[in-house]
Image: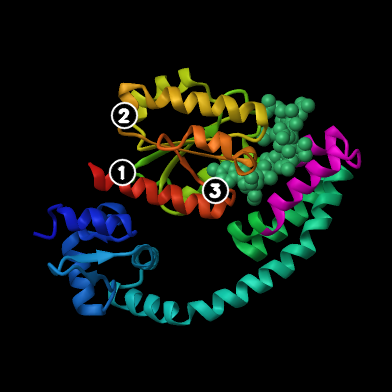
Amino acid sequence: MENSRGPADDAAQKLGMYPIRVVAKQTGIGAHTLRSWERRYGLPRPSRTTGTHRLYDVEDIALLRRVQQLILTGTPPGRACSYVLTEAAHAPRQLEADARAGAALGGALRNPLVEAFVELCEECANRVLSEAFHLLGPELALTEVVLPALAELGTAWKEGRASVAAEHFGSTLIRARLLSAFEGGSRGEHQPVALVGAGPGDQHEIPALVLALLLRRRGCRAMFLGQSVPLEALCDIIPRKRPNLICLTASTDGTAAALVDTLLQARSLPEAASIALAYGGLPFGRDAGLRCRLEGIATYLGDDLLVGADKASALLSQTITAV
Ligand code: B12
């Protein structure tokens, strides 16, 4: 019975709770195994509906993914579950300490990175980038060092403190780093598909690349489409890749307006009727009018890429449960 869908499921999913069928599909761990681990090892720990159906939240799913990683490296399931439960019990304090240390270290690495870009010093920039990724891990390196440095470089360029060459040099090095992390990431073979790219006319591909990378890190099957993706490209790719989610980004006022038009047109395509649409980027945070035009058509992912990736990943999960 737990594998069938009912009105209680719909209500629960709105609250970010998922039935066993969805969790089994998302993680690739069979429903039988999920029940057996719960009984034998105490993990996962779903809550129950009044009809006694199991409901899992995103944290349960994250713990299961961690167990899977350990099993892949040869740890038996029982020991993996016990290790992950102990790890989770200590996580909040550890995370708080990590975030504080990360912010301090990130602050110390940011200026040297901007300086290396301004001075066009490839060796210095690569050294700082390697240090950031190695010491902080990809997500903190991005949020605490790389993206703020890029924004500072843009301001320096606008104020005449950095040359156009420095901006191109910095963004090219960062793009290369991100692409290699993206290529090395898990491809989420059996997961729903997300297509991510910059909207029509927009050459700023880094936000889309970061989002695609973060989605892969969350186990989703993300494809990165690069710069300036027009409606025709989407029409071509939809029947071939059957995406569950399309997300476009824009970084300038002009391209943001073009992105809005494109998503409005995409929504009216019969072949895109069941595809979730989403968007984000600098101009949308500033201009509520742009967001208004897409109300009910596409989801605004906000102005924080980490939070945006979580939202996009939740949208993808909802598309599986809606099938
Ligand atoms: C690198 C860069 C370029 C590179 C892009 C290279 C590449 N391969 O991607 C190149 C040289 C091509 C370029 C070109 C131009 N650029 Co430019 N560029 C930048 C720069 C320095 C960094 C952009 C970037 O990738 N940042 C990294 C992202 C992740 O950070 P962010 O944009 O600050 O976004 C934050 C949030 O908004 C959020 N976010 C952003 N996108 C998304 C998406 C989602 C889904 C979510 C959830 C969140 C999110 O995340 C970030 C916070 O961490 C910015 C300066 C800046 N402030 O960012 C200018 C900037 C975006 N560029 C600008 C301009 C004007 C241009 C040009 C018109 C310049 C010109 N005269 O030729 C052209 C436009 C070309 C085009 N048609 O697209 C302006 C835009 C101003 C505006 N209001 O329109 C900026 C802001 C510079 C400035 N201070 O004036 N640029």
Question: Decide: marks 3, 2 in contact (CB < 8 A)?
Answer: no
Nearer-the-camera pick, 249 or 256: 256
The amino acid type found where label 3 is placed reads Gly
Quadrant position of residue 276: top left
Helix, strand or loop at mark 1: helix
Q: Residue at x 53, y 47 (%)?
A: 213
Q: Which residue is at a point 31% across and 24% down the rendered structure image?
A: 271
Q: Residue at x 16, y 64 (%)?
A: 32
Depth check: 77 or 288 in front?
Answer: 288
Tell me if 208 is positioned left or right of 310 in this view. right
Helix or strand or loop: what does disc 2 sit on?
Answer: loop
Q: CA distance from mark 2 to mark 1?
A: 12 Å
Which residue was labeled with disc 3?
302
Depth-wise, is mark 3 or mark 1 nearer the camera?
A: 3
User: What residue lies at 25% left-to-right and 56% top-to-bottom?
Assistant: 11
| Type of amino acid at the residue the image marks with label 1 | Thr
Tell which circle, 2 or 1, labels the residue nearer the N-terminal end: 2
Residue where numbered disc 2 is placed: 273
The answer to whether 47 appears left or right of 75 in the picture is left
Residue 144 on image: x %, y %:
68, 59
Q: Name the main secondary structure of what is drawn in magenta.
A: helix
Q: Are marks 2 and 1 in contact (CB under 8 Å)?
A: no
Q: Where is residue 322? Give x, y as percent.
A: 25, 44
Asked if the stretch drawn in magenta spans residue 90, the answer is no
- The magenta stretch is 144-172
Q: Nearer the viewer, residue 67 or 254?
A: 254
Question: Can residue 23 be seen?
Answer: no
Query: Three-letter amino acid code at disc 2?
Result: Ala
Q: Which dot marks residue 319?
A: 1
Ligand 1 appears in which quadrant? top right
Q: Is mark 3 within 8 Å of ligand 1?
A: yes
